[in-house]
Image (tube, grey):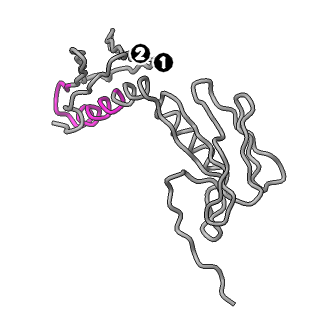
Amino acid sequence: MSRVGRRPIAVPSGVEVSLEAGTLTVKGPRGELSLAIPEGISAEVGDRALSFARENDRPPVRALHGLTRALANNMVIGVSQGFEKQIEVRGTGYRASVAGRKLSLKLGFSHEVEIEFPADVKVNVTGTTTRDQLPTTIVSISGINKEKVGHWADQVRRIFPPESYKGKGIRYADEYVRRKAGKTG
């Protein structure tokens, strides 16, 4: 039996969980999310708890057991607390700003890079500091869907990944970039 799949999910107060026709719906103070339960997995909504079971031990069903439980747990956390990823834009002259649904980045290219975000993902530029002698702008990406928050944080990071010589670029706030020594004279 899957160790992740058999653990019940505690449903906090203020969050409603309903199961209709193979679709799990979670409503909370931050919004509403739904998940289609895969074939071979059954969900049981109890009193302030949610649990999952599988019908057989075939490998595809076993793989989906823990995955379905993890996705449902992320939904419960998302509608009650939400998710947030912080990324840092490091470099002299590198800037980030938000206007409406667009994040505008100045990264030393000949043009400004703009990314448009969906309505359920919020983007804020929280501040500017100095780290490792480089000006750093902190950008916060938040929302109720963990997958979308992580996806959009990755899309921003891919524009200019951190380089290992000077440390310039876009990185996650908790990411460690191993620095290399440059050429010696």
Q: Quadrant of residue 125?
A: top right
Q: Position of residue 91 (x, y in %)?
A: 70, 59
Left or right for 60, reference 81: left
- Mark 1–mark 2 CB contact (< 8 Å): yes
Q: Amino acid at mark 1?
A: Gly
Q: Position of residue 140 (x, y in %)?
A: 59, 40
- Residue 96 included in the magenta stretch of the image: no
Report crowding for label 1: few under 14, some 14 to 19, many 20 or more residues within 10 A (C-alpha): some
Q: Quadrant of residue 153?
A: top right
Left or right for 167, reference 62: right
| Above or below for 66 versus 79 | below
Q: Position of residue 179 (x, y in %)?
A: 56, 71
- Mark 1–mark 2 distance (CA, rounded to whole Å): 6 Å
On the rendered image, what quadrant is the N terminus found in? top left
What is the residue that sits farthest to the top in this orientation?
20
Residue tagged 2: 27
Q: Nearer the viewer, residue 7 or 88?
A: 88
| Above or below for 4 versus 45 | below
Residue in view at x 66 percent, y 62 percent: 168
Residue in view at x 84 percent, y 53 percent: 110
Q: Nearer the viewer, residue 111 or 84?
A: 84
Residue in view at x 38 percent, y 29 percent: 77
> Which element is circle 2 on?
strand
On the rendered image, what quadrant is the C terminus found in? bottom right
- Residue 70 included in the magenta stretch of the image: yes
Report crowding for label 2: few under 14, some 14 to 19, many 20 or more residues within 10 A (C-alpha): some
Q: Position of residue 137 (x, y in %)?
A: 66, 50
Report how many numbered discs are placed on residues in the image. Answer: 2
Residue tagged 1: 31
Secondary structure mostly seen in magenta is: helix
Q: Amino acid at mark 2?
A: Lys
The residue range painted magenta reads: 53-72
